[in-house]
Image: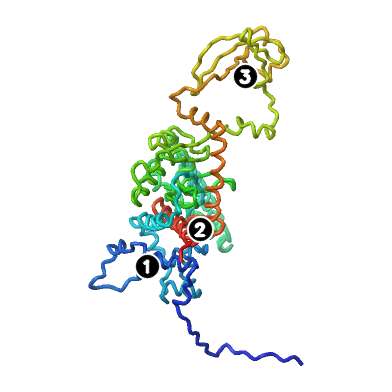
Amino acid sequence: MAKYKPYSYKQMVMLSVSLEDQIVPGTLEFAIHTLVEERMDVSRFDENYQNDDTGRLAYDPKVLLKVVLFGYSRGLNSSRKIERACLENVTFMALSCGQYPDHSTIAAFVSSMKDEIVSLFRDVLLVCEEMGLLGGTFFALDGLRLPSNASEQWTGTHAELRRKKERMEAKVKELLEEHATQDKRDEESPNAGIPTGRVHREKQIETLRKKAARIERFLRDNEPTYGPRGKEVTSNLTDNESARMWTSHGPIQGYNGQALIDAKHQVIIHAEAFGHSQDYAHGPPMLDGAKATMRIIGHGEDCFAGKILTADSNYHSTTTIRTCEEMGLDAYIPDRFFRKRDPRFATRRRPRKRFRLENFDYDEACDQYVCPSGKRLKLDARSIHADGMLKRRYVADERDCGGCPAQSRCLTARGGKRKYLMVPIGVEPTHLLRRMAAKVDTPQGRRIYPQRIAIAEPVFANIRAHKRLDRFTLRGKIKVTIQWLLYCMVHNIEKILNYGFT
């Protein structure tokens, strides 16, 4: 017969644990502990407490900040998960000195960091500067769209929400009619008992009335919001500062976390969350915020003068490019068609059905173009300003295009009678967008711009994949920005740890 070791759950086990020994030098928890204790000014939180003479003793903000930062580094973005870790995980116990803040305390602490978070972020960045982790010559700007704590069910323009309320009221009316019909049947058959569907209908009517009343209150208390281009954007009843965004994983209701990253060691120098999907309006506030941050840590007003900035085509806007020029930044921000003009991608392009400029032969002697059907296009205008480009216009004879078998591949406008060929000859010197597109198309631009991917994408991969930030758990732009900055702080602390902090 088999023999097993006896066991009993009634026995007592005494564990001797030195909390200080759990914070081992060379680990992330040691870096967080040391930075919070020695380099971060946590006295800013003192004004939030009024318990000098009376009241319960509060948890030290240093303890709460340590467990939050370490929790985010472990992928625990919920205050309940951090609370449980403080009860079960010996490293969390060591950082909290055996204290066990509950989830409501942790959540309130994170949500209340509106006035302190930027200063704390700059304290960490100052350490990066002192350690020589900032190159200060090459920057990349990018964003990460993540869902937030907002229901997609309650999203829509004011007109769409109003129609949704009307549909709910119509459904309530329909259910009430069913009620009345059932009541009449009950009068005719008094011994039939209570119908099984009656209770369900009553609950459904109550639920629909509450939802309709909620929409009505929202429409009464909130005006429509409009985007940077003057078009009404969707509103959301649970978090009206969030926005409906399109991602590679489909539509989400959330925020766009922006980060400006230094190229030397991928340190984030400024971060903020925005309730707008498109990035063309995010460039100026991000650059202004980064300039203020660099000034705080000891750089001058012209800290960006002559430095390189790369950003993807979503930032290709007049306001962003003008801001870069005012700061003296050597920016490389392509338009969305820049790959089509890049000869390196010529072999990947699909054959086009319509004729392009390269399908027309140029007769230099006559200054004319010959179409694929052998017909000639004569010069009509020597200089035309169109979309920031200087162009020459060549036009075909209407009789040549009328019966041409290749008309469907040549005429772009439906019902067109003749071919107009626009030949670019230069860029308007005052047109910012065209100048930027031409700059990116140069050999230097094609060499510099691709470096953006190697700078920015690993940062977002670290935050999203390693730190498991797959959604923001808070509501409102201010609170979401706090959470986003905390994750960016954890990323920067890891850089401090990896490059020599002991």
Q: Which residue is the extreme one toward the left? A: 53
Mark whose residue sits in front, 3 or 1 = 1
Rendered location of residue 41, percent (x, y): 33, 62
Rendered location of residue 73, percent (x, y): 50, 62
Q: CA distance from mark 3 to mark 1?
A: 71 Å
Q: How many marks?
A: 3
Rendered location of residue 91, percent (x, y): 48, 73
Pointer 2 or 1: first along the chain: 1
* Mark 2 secondary-structure assignment: helix
Pointer 2 or 3: first along the chain: 2
- On the image, numbered disc 3 is attached to which residue? 414
Dividing the picture into quadrants, the one containing residue 363 is: top right
Mark whose residue sits in front, 2 or 1 = 1
The amino acid pointed to by label 1 is Glu
Q: Nearer the viewer, residue 356 or 274?
A: 356
The amino acid pointed to by label 2 is Lys
The amino acid pointed to by label 3 is Arg
> Is residue 224 visible from the viewing direction of this image?
no
Q: Residues within 10 Å of mark 2 (few under 14, many from 20)?
A: few
Q: Nearer the viewer, residue 261 or 247?
A: 261
Q: Which residue is the extreme one toward the right? A: 1
Dividing the picture into quadrants, the one containing residue 408 is: top right
Q: Nearer the viewer, residue 26 or 213?
A: 26
Residue 203: mark in rendering:
2
- On the image, numbered disc 1 is attached to which residue? 37
Position above or below: 173 against 128: above
Q: CA distance from mark 2 to mark 3?
A: 56 Å
